[in-house]
Amino acid sequence: MHFLYHIGKYFLLMRRTFSKPEKWKVYINQFFFEVDNIGVRSLGLITIISFFMGGVITIQAAYSFTSPLIPLYAVGYTARESMILEFSPTIISLILAGKVGGNIASEIGSMRISEQIDALEIMGVNSASFLILPKVLAGIFINPFLIAISIFLGLFGGYVMGVLTGACTPYEYIFGIQAFFMPWKLTYAFVKTAVFGGIITSVSAYQGYYVEGGALEVGRGSTRAVVYGSILILVANFIITQIFFVQ
């Protein structure tokens, strides 16, 4: 019953969050601020992780395909499929759940215990919409762009590492990442990353919004935001995969 209580409370908060904004200009400015805060400031971490993740996938694939029946371009094909279907969308989103989710939960939680949210309510401001809506929309908007960058950097990292280590030749790798490409797989990747962006921001905001106590509870709320956000990302990943792949 405690689980159902939090589900109901979460959806009631989202109902308040997506109510009509009082001043669109303020929300638009806050939206672009959150795009920078959530997306642009995460690019460094995404760049490093994606580059080396693509390199590792390429090297592992190259030294795993020992059968002469497997064509050499399968290395590039494997790197492309791995980055598009799972590694970039899901792994990067799980990492962002830790970085972005923890930050959002601690930010809103700190506002709750310092009574800033109560002050907004007294002034007649819909605090849920003002604080959470720009974050959720920014997460849904910017996450597919981050994943597109991650896919490119992962494939580039695979090319660099594969050629430098002698795991594959440039021609084999480039031919492999072009072979049998199906555009709908990119649609699948971007759809689920947009969903993941909404999960990360909304779950983290929920945990921070209802923090009670002091700084210790803010820390616990941030931890719950990361844990619950990661679990929901994996559940949503399974459901979306079933929808796209099971005919």
Image (cartoon, helix red, strand yellow):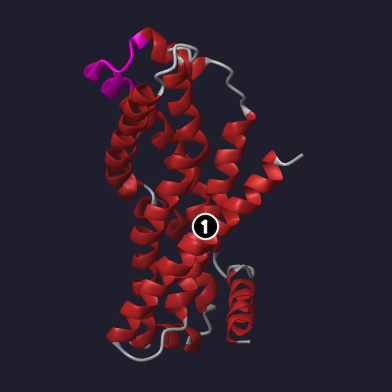
Q: How far from the left and from the top, in percent, is residue 216?
A: 29, 85
Residue, x 40% and y 15% (percent of image)?
173
State yes or no: residue 163 in magenta: yes
Nearer to the camera, 182 or 44 = 182
State yes or no: residue 220 in magenta: no
> Going by the picture, which residue comes out furthest to the right?
247
The quadrant in which the N terminus is found is bottom right
Judging by the rendered image, the residue that carries numbered circle 1 is 233
Q: Does residue 35 appear left or right of residue 43 in this picture?
A: right
Mark 1 closeness class: few <14, some 14–19, many ≥20 residues within 10 Å? many
Q: Quadrant of residue 246?
A: top right
Residue, x 33% and y 43% (percent of image)?
46
Nearer to the camera, 235 or 202 = 235
The residue stretch that appears in magenta: 159-170
Residue, x 35% and y 91% (percent of image)?
213
Up-down relation of residue 151 to residue 200 (above or below):
above
Tell me the chief SS of the magenta region: helix
Amino acid, disc 1: Ile
Nearer to the camera, 194 or 142 = 194
Up-down relation of residue 63 to residue 232 (above or below):
above
Q: How far from the left and from the top, in percent, is residue 210?
A: 47, 83
